[in-house]
Amino acid sequence: METFGLDKETCRDIIDWMKAKGYSINTIQQYTYTLKQLSINDGEISNENLRKVIKKFKHQNQRAVLYIINNYCFDKGIDFRLLIPKIKVKPRKMPEILSLEEIKVMIDSAPHPFNLAIRCLYNMGAGLRISEIIKFSWSNIRWADWLSNQENYGIALIKSGKGSKDRVVNIPSNLMKDLYSYAKEQNNLNENQIPTGGMIFPMGNSEWKQELKETNLDQWKNEYIRHAYNWFRYSILHKCCEKALNKHIKIHSLRSSRATYLYEIEKVPIERIQLLLGHSSIATTMIYTKVNPVSTFEMLKNTKEL
């Protein structure tokens, strides 16, 4: 088979195959867009027109669709394989590491309850993704265990993280107490004094796309994450935290800062940090835990100078 047709039916079949394989909603959405572009522009793909396709789709995520097509064909027993040349990939930039003082300023500058959201992003496990805190609900926390001993740390289940994986993380005791106080403020306690309800930190307009929510909940959840991310990025990070620190902040910096702090200061083994972060590969964890230059400067401050 020298060419592979990318009509609408085949594209839908590839998308269904990705869903069955457990690809995340965001990944499927990205690949769906690229598949549609391939379908519209070329209609079919072959090794002859591969270089033209690669020139057109320069982003790494776009080119990843070529591997998806290969894996799909192999899995379905289709006699077609793209001979994808090695593509030079730009080295990943080292994530910015925020200091504890900078994170404290961010927390102090954010309005309630989003100061709690920033504390959750930084303090839970080895740091959370913004999509995880957007979806985070009261039922994700094991409240009964913590209520039996409120000096202990809390435990939370992060559901359907990146790659549709679940993982368990700890919540420091003071943060647990403040989350519980917030649940009381919201009158979210049931007869057993356990917090109930949906998302802990609803972001943006509470009535956002109600019609879609009622007709297609899965699609609404996916679109809401993007809506909530943009709202948090502008209304909290830009208007409050960046203004207070007078610098641009990437939300993901909180996660990489926490991982680096645990590795450098608390001396947590990198394998444990990998587990808390939910990384499949320890190589990814090692990118997060690059040595903070400031700590190196501290080590060198008493060295002799000429």
Image: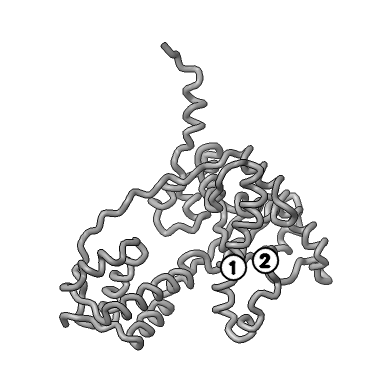
Up the image or down, 268 lies above or below 300; here it is: below
| Residue 133 image label | none
Crowding at dot 2, Cα within 10 Å, few <14 / some 14-19 / many 20+, comes out as some
* Residue beneath the point at 50% across and 50% down: 273
Q: Are marks 1 and 2 in contact (CB under 8 Å)?
A: yes
Front residue of this view, candidates 89 and 272: 89
Image check: 95 left or right of 216?
left
SS state under label 1: helix
Q: Quadrant of residue 217?
A: bottom right
Up the image or down, 27 lies above or below 149; here it is: below
Crowding at dot 1, Cα within 10 Å, few <14 / some 14-19 / many 20+, comes out as some
Image check: 134 left or right of 69?
right
* Residue beneath the point at 38% across and 49% down: 92
* Residue beneath the point at 56% across and 48% down: 249
Could you tell me which quadrant the C terminus lies in? top left
- The residues bearing labels 1 and 2 have C-alpha atoms spaced at a distance of 8 Å
Residue 207, image x, y percentages: 70, 75
Residue 101, image x, y percentages: 63, 37
Image check: 196 left or right of 261?
right
Residue 45, image x, y percentages: 23, 77
Amino acid at dot 2 = Gly
Q: Number of marks in the image?
A: 2
Upstream in sequence: badge 1 or badge 2: 2
Residue under numbered circle 1: 227
Could you tell me which quadrant the N terminus lies in? bottom left
SS state under label 2: loop
Amino acid at dot 1 = His
Front residue of this view, candidates 77 and 217: 217
* Residue beneath the point at 56% across and 63% down: 131
Residue 297, image x, y percentages: 49, 27
Residue found at the far bottom of this picture = 9
Residue under numbered circle 2: 204
